Image (spheres, coloured by chain):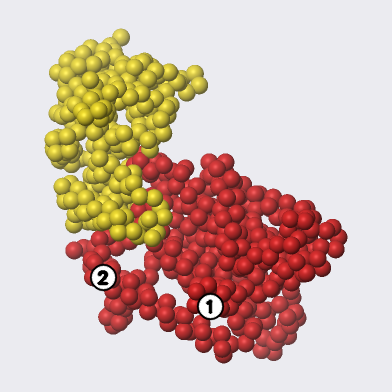
Amino acid sequence: MSLLRTENMTMRFGGVVAVSDLNVHLEKNEIIGLIGPNGAGKTTAFNMISGVYKPTSGRIFLGIEEVQGDQAVMVEKDITGMKPSAITKLGVARTFQNIRLFKELTVLENVVIANHLRLDSNWVSSVVRTPDYSKKEDAMFEKSMALLEKVGLEHLKDEKSYSLPYGMQRRLEIARALATDPHILLLDEPAAGMNPQESDELMHFIGRIRDEFDLSILMIEHHMQVVMGICERIYVLDYGITIAEGNPAEIQNNPKVIEAYLGVDE
Amino acid sequence: MNGVKSKQRRRRDAILTAVAILVIGVLLYLANIYMDNYQLRILNLCGIYIILSLSMILINGFVGLFSLGHAGFMAIGAYTVALLCTPPMAKQMNYYLEPIVPWLAEIEWPFLPATLLGGVLAAIMGLLIGAPVLRLKDDYLAIATLGFAEIIRIVFTNTQSITNGSLGLKGLPEMEITLPVINFTLNLSACIWITAILTVLFMVRLVNGSYGMAFKAIREDEIAAEAMGINVFKHKLLAFVIASFFAGIGGGLLGNIMGTVDPLMFRFLLTYNIVLIVVFGGIGSLTGGVLAAIVITAAMELLRFLDSSFHMGPIDVPGIPGLRMVAFSLLLMFIIIFKPRGIMGVREFSWQWLIELPRSMKNGSFGRKKLRKDVSK
């Protein structure tokens, strides 16, 4: 069963069809790419999957492990129209095209906050500081520190997040998403604005976290070098319509894709 | 939030806090003996404004919602206390236009449950108002909350047989709480300052805990906070209800210190006073809120001479009522222009800072350099 599956997912803004009948599926531990020229509807698709928009029509399903009786079984759960926070709780984390860190807070705080959703104490126990709550808070900090070490940001933990260099901010945003304990990671243009060396580093970083955190990744990306280098399957959107699907080699030679990107000879 | 604090340091901080509270207690006790009634009243007012400013900082500073509804929630608290605690005799004298409804006429509650009920009723009103209003943002939210505060005031003005309308309630006895087991009686001053200290402790712990961090995340970026699994609406509502509760408590105490409660007390000007304190102290700093509450409340009284005629060197200034508020408006303008984040910004007091102060003062950095060194490490 797929971890993520969309079924004829469509989004209309007034008369504009931003995304039309999109069918993607994401299997366990896959890295897949969503590419297309500007305005193709990639971010809209992301916003529907993460719950920011409710699709005009179509459905979105998550494959979720559920304990039934004494064994864990995979069940398909319809998440269409759920709140973003509820979808994140089910194990879908995302980053943003234009970095959205909690700017005035420190690097460590940014990551700790992403643990809040798994906290099962109520606010009263956080004020009273019951031993149980204190233990959980300490665990949150320890887990966050461990995560920062894994992504190589531990030496910057007390820096305000806005003061980080651009590449580090991208990395922190991914770390923050990882702190929510996701199964699926949605990356919206993680290499945007990076130089070739930085995007090369990022590519290795993404591959590494996939293995280390047992993730399945869906990414939007413009850097062809990154997409072709890391994605196992690629979907190409143009004006909201899926024009191609396949592995990097197939996509590179697909005439429709070349037409969408470069235009066609009259 | 300093990240992971060691157990040792946490214990040290707890002891220092306890000592500080004890010192404040002794100082207040001495103040009660040596200060005259007027000075004592200002002191009590400081305590009340600490409660009110912290309550406002929670929503306006930490969750980043621009709410201007405080006067309304305070009115609920004040009226609850006044209606429940005024002795039946005094009530009879108050309601000469229209008799009081029978179920309120004979009631006389002790202060503690009445004040708490005032807070709870304000919190319930906060929940009812917050549920629709918190879907708005920025200035729209400000206008809506301001509108609701006015609605509450107008309702109180017109429910003659319950609140005595614009005549208000007079003859509220001074608050006294007798502790049950040890039979010790707390006077008004003690009640106010114990509440203020409890409020400070509550807010510090709330803001530094996981929920407080979620509030800050919402302030920084709502969309990202929601994407991190924080139910933004629920958390906003939670903060709004908590703030309403403390506004209600503060209102109850304020009514008590005044001895009378009437609708005109709860006009927008009251909210404005709290906004002034919060902006002066630094939106997003509890320390700033406490300091500003004391400074501004004291200054409000010290500058009273501006309202009457005074001499400025050779110049005779005639008494202009309201000149005091002009001074405060100027002050607010200066702060917004030159120190837009208030005196404290988002910085907070910590014992660690105080302990390292002598050393940092020696090299003239007041703790700032230390901070930078920590970062580069």
Q: Is residue A246 left or right of residue B114?
A: left
- Total numbered badges shown on the rendered structure: 2
Seen at 43% across and 18% down, the residue is A57
Q: Please tell me which of labels 1 and 2 falls first in the chain.
A: 2
Q: Find numbered disc 2 in the image and state the secondary structure of the residue it sits on.
A: helix
| Mark linked to residue B183 | 1
Residue bearing mark 2: B9
- Can you tell which quarter of the image residue A11 is in? top left
**Residue toward you, A118 or A169:** A118
**Residue toward you, A74 or A204:** A74
Disc 2 chain ID: B
Disc 1 marks a residue whose amino acid type is: Asn
Q: Is residue B212 above or below residue B91?
A: above
Q: Which chain gets the yellow colouring?
A: A
Chain B, colour shown: red
Q: Give the quarter of the figure containing the N terminus of chain A.
A: top left
